[in-house]
Image (cartoon, coloured by chain):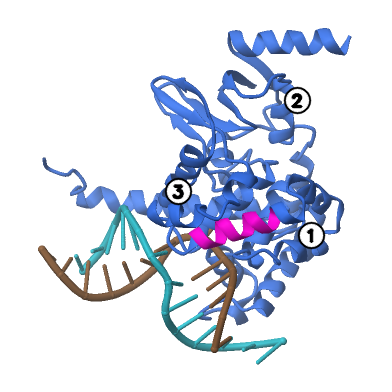
Chain colours: A blue, B cyan, C brown
DNA sequence: AGCCTACCTGGGTC
DNA sequence: AGACCCAGGTAGG
């Protein structure tokens, strides 16, 4: 019974668009905010076709929405056996119905209510810890555009080619063992990773030494605080990135990554005494995190992600607005 | 414990 | 053109 089901899935994966989910209009999924909202850096949007292409689990995916359906296609994979539907359900946490939490958070907090009104359907992804960790090492003190290009470089140089789709080669995210090799640091320097080169190679070596993927699995079974503390033993992982990993790939949804944006949000709206500080100290960091946890409860990290996305969106809109009157953006020659 | 600063790089601004 | 400035931080002082 199981077998025939997975065979069916496998066949369906290869052929054409398949449905992974039908959702209700009051509990939608918004792919722009979810896939381009700074959780993952590997998804691209074809605006003409309104299709998304990306890689996770050594597999190339195309996604699109049609009415109230989330549709997918697999364009190649290094995995022998695929249960596409199960993989996507896990990735998007489709076993979770979030609308009740959204309602509760809106009732509790005006800022959340406003954010949510502008921005329905953000989902907290459940990513793979290895990709998540090294992507967010790249993210420190960096722009999203450069983060994305660095992540792609990691894949091109240390991952495996999966397949070529529309003349573009897609690569898997490298195994942690590959990144742990001593020569990796120099190579990454050469590729323009700057000081992050050392962080990547050294933390990879530590992870391998401590058990690789098994070590990550053990972090899921720990409490949030213990997992966070373990992660921060890695060279190049501080409080912020540790919280990103806890939240995005270790199922600790009370983690609140406090970056400059979240600090701004907190100081502006909730904790006025923190305004005008030069940088976020450990103490302030904990205070901000605790504030959100008290406000939103055990899934505070998901609520935080919605606030974060709303803030990003506002920034983008501001840029677009200020762009219009000038109209000098077109470059000549 | 808490505050300060150097750190790679590239894209944007003036 | 060329100096800034800044970006989803962190280690080391």
Q: Point out residue A190 in the picture as x, y percentages from the top left corner.
A: 38, 54
Q: Quadrant of the N terminus of chain A?
A: top right
Secondary element at tag 2: helix
Asked if residue A66 shows in the view, the reply is: no
Q: Residue at x 81, y 50 (%)?
A: A220
**Span shown in magenta:** A197-207
Q: Say which label, 1 or 2, has the lower sequence index.
A: 2
Query: Which residue is the site of mark 1?
Result: A227
Instruction: Give left or right: position of B6 versus A178.
Output: left
Give the number of callouts.
Answer: 3
Q: Nearer the viewer, residue A227 or A324?
A: A227
Q: Whole-Å distance between the Cαs marked 1 and 2?
A: 26 Å
Q: Which type of secondary structure does the marked residue at label 1 adopt?
A: helix
Residue displayed at 67% across by 63% down: A234
How packed is label 3: few (under 14 Cα within 10 Å), some, or many (20 or more)? many
Task: Give the alpha-carbon distance from disc 1 to disc 3, as whole Å.
Answer: 26 Å
Q: Of A252 and A151, which appears nearest the observer? A: A151
Chain of the residue under label 2? A
Circles 1 and 2, Cβ within 8 Å, touching? The answer is no
User: Who's the residue at 75% across and 57% down the image?
Assistant: A108
Seen from this angle, which residue lies furthest right? A1
Residue A86's label in the rendered image is: 2
Q: Is residue A112 left or right of residue A86?
A: left
| Foreground of the two, A270 or A140 | A140
- Residue marked by disc 3: A150
On the image, the x and y values in percent for residue A48 come to 39, 23
Please tell me whether residue A203 belongs to the stretch shown in magenta. yes
Q: Residues within 10 Å of mark 2 (few under 14, many from 20)?
A: few
Q: Nearer the viewer, residue A161 or A2?
A: A161
In the image, residue A101 above or below residue A206: above
Left or right, A235 with respect to A226, comes to: left
Q: Where does the C terminus of chain A fall, quadrant-wise? A: top left
């Amino acid at each position: 019974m199981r077998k025939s089901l997975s065979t069916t899935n496998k066949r369906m994966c290869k052929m054409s668009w398949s449905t992974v989910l039908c959702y209700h209009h009051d509990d939608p999924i918004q792919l722009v905010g979810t896939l381009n909202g700074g959780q993952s850096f590997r998804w691209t949007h074809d605006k003409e076709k309104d299709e998304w292409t990306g890689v996770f689990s050594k597999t190339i995916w195309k996604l699109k929405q049609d009415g109230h359906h989330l549709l997918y296609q697999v364009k190649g994979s290094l995995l022998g056996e695929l249960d596409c539907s199960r993989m996507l359900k896990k990735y998007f946490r489709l076993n979770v119905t979030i609308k009740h939490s959204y309602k509760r958070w809106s009732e509790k907090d005006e800022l959340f209510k406003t954010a949510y009104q502008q921005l329905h359907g953000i989902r907290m992804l459940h990513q793979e810890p290895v990709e998540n960790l090294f992507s967010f090492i790249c993210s420190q003190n960096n722009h999203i555009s450069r983060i994305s290009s660095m992540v792609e470089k990691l894949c091109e140089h240390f991952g495996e080619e999966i397949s070529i789709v529309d003349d573009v080669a897609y690569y898997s995210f490298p195994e942690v063992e590959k990144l742990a090799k001593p020569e990796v640091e120099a190579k990454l320097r050469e590729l323009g990773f700057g000081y992050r080169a050392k962080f990547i190679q050294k933390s990879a070596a530590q992870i391998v030494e401590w058990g690789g993927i098994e070590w990550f699995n053990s972090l899921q079974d720990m409490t949030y605080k213990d997992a966070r503390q373990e992660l921060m033993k890695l060279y190049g992982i501080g409080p912020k990135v540790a919280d990103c990993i806890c939240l995005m790939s270790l199922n600790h949804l009370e983690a609140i990554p406090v970056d400059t944006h979240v600090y701004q949000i907190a100081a502006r709206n909730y904790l006025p005494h923190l305004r005008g500080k030069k940088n976020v100290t450990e103490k302030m960091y904990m205070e901000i995190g605790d504030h959100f946890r008290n406000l939103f409860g055990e899934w505070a990290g998901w609520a935080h992600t919605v606030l974060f996305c709303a803030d990003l969106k506002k920034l983008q809109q501001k840029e677009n607005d200020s762009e219009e009157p000038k109209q000098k953006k077109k470059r000549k020659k």
